[in-house]
Amino acid sequence: MFARGETAIAAFDPVSATNVLLSALPAAARVKAIHYTQGGHWLLLWGWLVGVGASLIIARLGLLRGLRQAITGGRPRPWLFSLIAAGVYILGDAILELPWSVYSGWWREKSYGLTSQPLAGWFSDQAIGLVINIIAVSLFLAALYALIRRTPRWWWAWASGLAALFIIILTVLGPVLIEPLFNKYTPAPPGPTRDAVVALAKIAGVPSDKIYIYNGSKQSNRYTANVSGLFGSARVAMSDVMFAKGADIAEVRGVVGHEMGHYKRAHVIIGALIFSLLALIGFAIAQAVFPLVDKWVKTGALGISDPTGLPTLLIIFSTLGLLGTPLTMTFTRFEESDADAFSLRVAHEPDGLSKALVKTIEYRADSPGPVEEFLFYDHPSVRRRVQRAMNWKAAHLAETERQEGLDAAASK
């Protein structure tokens, strides 16, 4: 009675199916994707160097020292100084890094055909983002310096919780206050696509009344969707690029099922907890090495509690972030694999998910070596993800065939 299922297993080879799917991208496009991906690895190093250089310039110019004297004038105004110092630093850093930002964030994307956004539109988005950064980061840093002043020995322990709290607040506010500043979100119109997503949301146990399409093509030609927000602000959003590139219902179900997995599996909450643990380690290291590093940076800070030393503090954080890249990448790869597995369990669309993944190899090399994937990839390689989907398909094809055989035998 298992003969039919065994024939199906033999007829469907997951490895061959994976190779066929990945061969859809022309060789020239594959080479281009490899160059783009591997060039992106170097951006991590160059971006760090540019950031360190900008911090050194701000420190050596004495901008924050002069600001400290102008604001305090011998009177203690720690909250005001830390708030303004953070805003000045962020603005100064953005100006100094502008040429690099134009190259890495716009020109390079344009040269690889990954954006159609005019430079003026890119500048507009950057200006909005800068204002948001100044407000959010200044508030965070002001709170951080308050903790350092209040608990000079143990501030680093409390600060990790503060970082997690800010992440959660920004996640909740993102769909309501921040994302609409960059894109137009409209409810998905009635039709087969919306019906499929609503049905999937109900099966998955996620909100089914907030399903949107947004003009993601304004910034990027990448094929994508996301679930953003938390608690009452959570919503499913699909970029119009998905439909411009001919996504069918199976692909939509596969991709949205993946994004719903992030929501249902509480990846944002888990990520905030993991980040707070990493922040705990980072803040503790900053406490220990600040005096030594500040002698090299020469900010003129009176100690780690003095916002004049902000360039030193951020050099330390950015360096730790660079060194910790493999660790953070490993965690995000785990989340992405978990979301894929959720999609397969709930949406049952291994072919749809795989076809969608193949479309992402226009900007993500599909078959990196294990070391490259470990060091730099925030998603598992496309080959690995498609292979898992095909393995799932093979296993469930066998189950279906065997169940049909059992049903047929029982009916005799």
Image: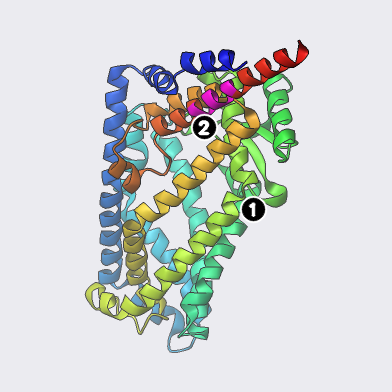
Residue 218 percent coordinates (x, y): 50, 31
Look at mark 2 in the image and give the residue it sits on. Answer: 224
**The N terminus lies in quadrant:** top right
Look at mark 1 in the image and give the residue it sits on. Answer: 172
As displayed, is residue 28 above or below residue 302? above
Q: Which residues are magenta?
A: 391-398
**In the picture provided, is 266 more to the left or to the right than 54?**
right
Residue 101 at least partly seen:
no
**In the picture provided, is 339 more to the left or to the right than 13?**
right
Q: Which SS class for mark 2? A: loop
> Mark 1 is on which residue type?
Val
> Mark 2 is on which residue type?
Thr
Q: How many marks?
A: 2
Residue 336 at least partly seen:
yes
Residue 15 percent coordinates (x, y): 40, 23
Residue at image position (41%, 33%) is 384
As displayed, is residue 103 above or below residue 54? above
As displayed, is residue 224 above or below residue 147? above
Residue at image position (55%, 20%) is 247
Q: Which SS class for mark 1? A: helix
Q: Report the front residue among 273 and 237.
A: 273
Residue at image position (26%, 32%) is 35
